[in-house]
Amino acid sequence: MGLIPKTGRRDPKVRGLLFAIFLILCVGAASMLVPFMLMLSGSTRTGVDLHEFSLVPRFVFDEELLFQKYVEGLYNESPSDLRAAWGTDHRDFSDVRLLPEVDMVSVDLWASFLEINRPQPQEYFSGYVYAPVSRGRPVNVRGFMHSLLKQFDGSIESMNREMETDFKDWNAFRVLPPDTRSRNGFQTPSDFDVRWQLYVIDEAPQWSVGVYNLDAYFHERVTATLHGRDASRVRLTDSAGDGDENWELFVREVVHPGYVRMDPAYSGLWQEFLRARYGTFTSYRNVTGMHDENWSHLSLPSSLPENSALATDWLAFLEGWTDLEEGRFYQMPLDGLRLESLDLLWRAASGEEPPIRQWDQWRFKKNTSEIRKAFLIQNYATVWEILIVHGRGLWVTVVYCAGAVLIALIVNPLAAYALSRFRPKNSYAFLLYLLLTMAFPPMVTQIPLFLMLRDLHLLNTFWALLLPGMAHGYSIFLLKGFFDSLPRELYESASLDGAGELLMFRVITLSLSKPILAVIALSAFVNAYTGFMFALLICQDERMWTLMVWLYQLQQNYGSGVMNAAFVLAALPTLIVFLLAQRQILRGIVVPSEK
């Protein structure tokens, strides 16, 4: 029965009151819904929209913002890499704009050109690998990890053993491929690097992989560095012009040697260089493992040799090497050097710059739905993998919360029933003691509890989590007051019928106390689920971390997008438990008022 009868609701003043109450409730609901929506929206953010304030992710309906996010991920959140690919002067990804129209003729020709002239391994680059601004786990890192999971049946130990890596677990998995445009990226590839290159070529989404533009990279790394960002662009050529010191600097010291070609006509100088470097032909053969007969049979390789020792010599000949004994400097002459890359070949064939910007926009248009979906779910997928698939956070939390609720519904009602039913002589002293436990903040008791659990050798166990909270003073005090309000005649009648105390406790007391038990259960669940400091203090082993401890650790390694996704997922269990217990909780509010 409602507090206001139907006839009374016809009065205009009552209707106004009801409308005001309804409006206040709606405002209250909105005040709780808005933070949740902000977390939902924040869970999809990357660097380009990191500081936006909106309840709905704007890239869902704003195609230009989605394109900015796509380009940001493709160039690994590095504006420098964007400029070195497009040949533009964008200072930030928020400056990127969709072209009004894509020249499909140029794009189709470029795609056909790439099919005919297959890029070399050093000419590929993978986007969605680094995320220094948003600090997430990008698409291709997760994809490569899933590929290795299948290959090694989920065993990180097998992968470490075969690929000579040292990942502690799958949550520590990282991909740091070298920048194969630069000289710093020249290194002997490990088994892990080779497997990564195969993934990029064969398994990664095509819209997440690109090829380098050496001409734009030349301007970004050399011209702009030496002469300022406003310096006029100088086209990179395949060979040096007269007095072109920048070209020589780029070839000898900056660019990856895989792009460099040497003229075999300088084989004589190459032989002299190797003779000075090794001394004897036997030493040369022992170090390089080559089977040439004598010095005169050595020919200068036109491109970077596959033999690692010979590749080191080839690079030293390119950069320059001094024989300290004779004081002679050996270096490949400038007129025998040239560059070979896809963009230079394209320009030689078409006379135009490669349409990489238009190619990127075409790939974006072609895969818009997949890209949008990737940004919507990538942070949630990351949290799911870290906390649930490769971590024990969910399992530990479920066991801990279930145990805490079960113990709270056994120990506290039994203690309150004893105080209410038998009324011991010192019951008020017991109640005072229970109230005193509420006077001290939890921080005061954590150190003594830690020392006691350590002495009992219970650290990093479920018992350490459950035993300190078995009896809760406030819950016992609350339950005793509720049990005191139950009619005593029920117990007298049951006793006359031969019922024992346990039967009366189970059938009468617990049956009539469902609302207050629901409140106690919810309180025990919330305390166990949200407990952080105590759980971190007594369970420092990663295998015993609860979700709250995992969330803290995530905050140290990941950005706000991943954290918002984690908060959304972490809020769901509490919401579900509250919805399941809300009827009993409301009865606990209404029934006492009706009495």
Image (spheres, rainbow, N blue to C red):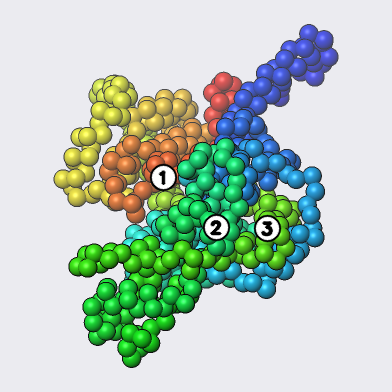
Q: Residues within 10 Å of mark 1 (few under 14, many from 20)?
A: few
Question: Which of the two discs, 2 and 1, labels the residue nearer the N terminus?
Answer: 2
Q: Residues within 10 Å of mark 3 (few under 14, many from 20)?
A: many
Residue in front for this viewpoint, 498 or 83: 83
- Which residue position is annotated with label 2? 241
- Residue appearing at x 67%, y 22% in the figure: 27
Question: Which disc number belongs to residue 557?
Answer: 1
Quadrant the C terminus occupies: top right
Helix, strand or loop at disc 2? loop
Residue in front for this viewpoint, 139 or 219: 219
Q: Residues within 10 Å of mark 2 (few under 14, many from 20)?
A: few
Helix, strand or loop at disc 3? loop
Question: Which of the two discs, 3 and 1, labels the residue nearer the N terminus?
Answer: 3
Q: Whole-percent x and y of residue 8? A: 79, 13
- Residue appearing at x 45%, y 54% in the figure: 249
- Residue appearing at x 31%, y 64% in the figure: 329
Of the residues shown, which amino acid type is indicated by label 1?
A: Asn
Q: Is residue 269 left or right of residue 211?
A: left
Task: Give the spatial CA distance, label 3 vs label 2.
Answer: 22 Å
Q: Is residue 438 left or right of residue 208?
A: left
Of the residues shown, which amino acid type is indicated by label 2?
A: Gly
Of the residues shown, which amino acid type is indicated by label 3?
A: Pro
Task: Give the spatial CA distance, label 2 vs label 1.
Answer: 48 Å
Q: Whole-percent x and y of residue 93? A: 61, 41
- Which residue position is annotated with label 3? 354
- Residue appearing at x 29%, y 47% in the figure: 540
